[in-house]
Image: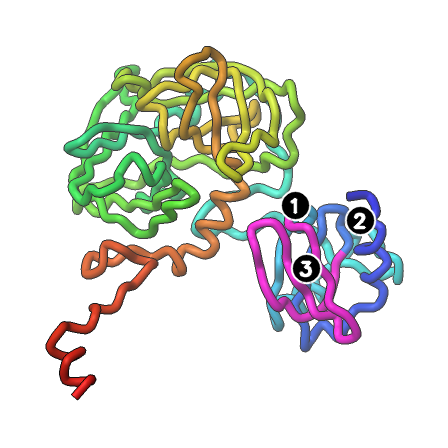
Amino acid sequence: MIRSCVLLSALVACGLPSALADTIQLKDKAAISGKVLAEKSDQIVVDLGYTVLIVPRNQVLKILRGDDATAATKRSHGSKPAAGGAALEVTEPKAGFYSAPAKLPPVRSVLELVNQIGEAVVQVRTPSGLGSGFFLNEDGYLITNFHVIEGETQISVEVYRLQDGQLDRKTYKQVRIIALNKFGDLALLKVDDKDAPRFKSVPLGSADALSVGETVFAIGSPLGLERTVTEGILSTKTREVGGVLYLQTTAQINPGNSGGPLFNLSGEVVGVTNMKVSSGEGLGFAIPVEAVKFFLDHRDAFAYSNDNPGTPYRYLEPPSRTRHAQAQD
């Protein structure tokens, strides 16, 4: 990783004209100018003109496209110089589909955070079971696990609001599936009820920035016990299960927690809880938030269609025996 960072810093000085190129802002406040050829969950492929560079995604802060990159270059000031003396200012992301602050909010106690962000965590119900979820923005878009709603279209969301010192439970039944990623075990939903208010949401943080041993906590509905808070530490960031890397935590995760958020002590979502080892205790797992951001940033590729529940995989009708016979004639 150190070698990769040195290479990236060295190549910044050789950037292409920013007016014709994309700009990749790095976490060390340097930047690379080139044409983005491909974006993958773990890396970004950039054409520098004379060579192609593979950039580790965990080193990338933001990607600016074409004219946006030019405008950002003009606005930049006071940033860390790159090898050639020119760099872009790393700014707070603009308000968008979800919030992901560039600066880590202050650390607070679990008690303070639960009172502040607890209303953004919801219970997701289907005829066959229940799970948890959390709002990404005030418009009612929320994340949960794919396996929570798998095979279901009749979905309801229970929201808990604190009013006059009392919890007010409200159930919304007009819930639409926006996008699904079966293999990533993620689902994007939206509350479409006409009387739905503006919802409280939570920001997305960075699992890459976590250290093993840091305190994390989960909020969810284990076994239907809504608004349950469990605290623990991050046991490892690289637990491989079925060819996929998960966050492992000692925070208690049980059936019903699935789809709920795993928070750091700054109140940011660092993972989506989705499973545990049933034969042990303190062995819970969560999908890293980087995978969630990738899913959300490319949600059009995972878009769900009522006309084709198998989306994003589309199947053609097999040829009939009659057509096959006619073709042989």
Say which residue label 1 marks: 58
In this picture, which residue range is highlighted in magenta? 31-57
Residue 72, above or below 263: below
Say which residue label 3 marks: 24
Sequence-first disc among 3 and 2: 2
Sequence-first disc among 3 and 1: 3
Sequence-first disc among 1 and 2: 2
Residue 274 lies in the magenta stretch: no
Where is residue 82? Give x, y as percent.
84, 56
Query: Can you tell which quarter of the image residue 158 is in?
Result: top left
Where is residue 200? Give x, y as percent.
37, 35
Q: Quadrant of the N terminus?
A: top right
Secondary structure beneath disc 2?
helix
Residue lying at 72% horizontally and 65% vertically, measured from the top left? 73
Between marks 3 and 1, how big is the CA–CA gap?
Answer: 12 Å
Please rate how many residues cluster around mark 2, counting C-alpha atoms within 10 Å: few if below 14, some from 14 to 19, many from 20. some
Say which residue label 2 marks: 5
Residue lying at 40% horizontally and 60% vertically, measured from the top left? 301
Secondary structure beneath disc 1?
helix
Of tags 3 and 2, the one toward the viewer is 2
Instruction: Say which amino acid is labelled 2.
Output: Cys
Secondary structure beneath disc 3?
strand
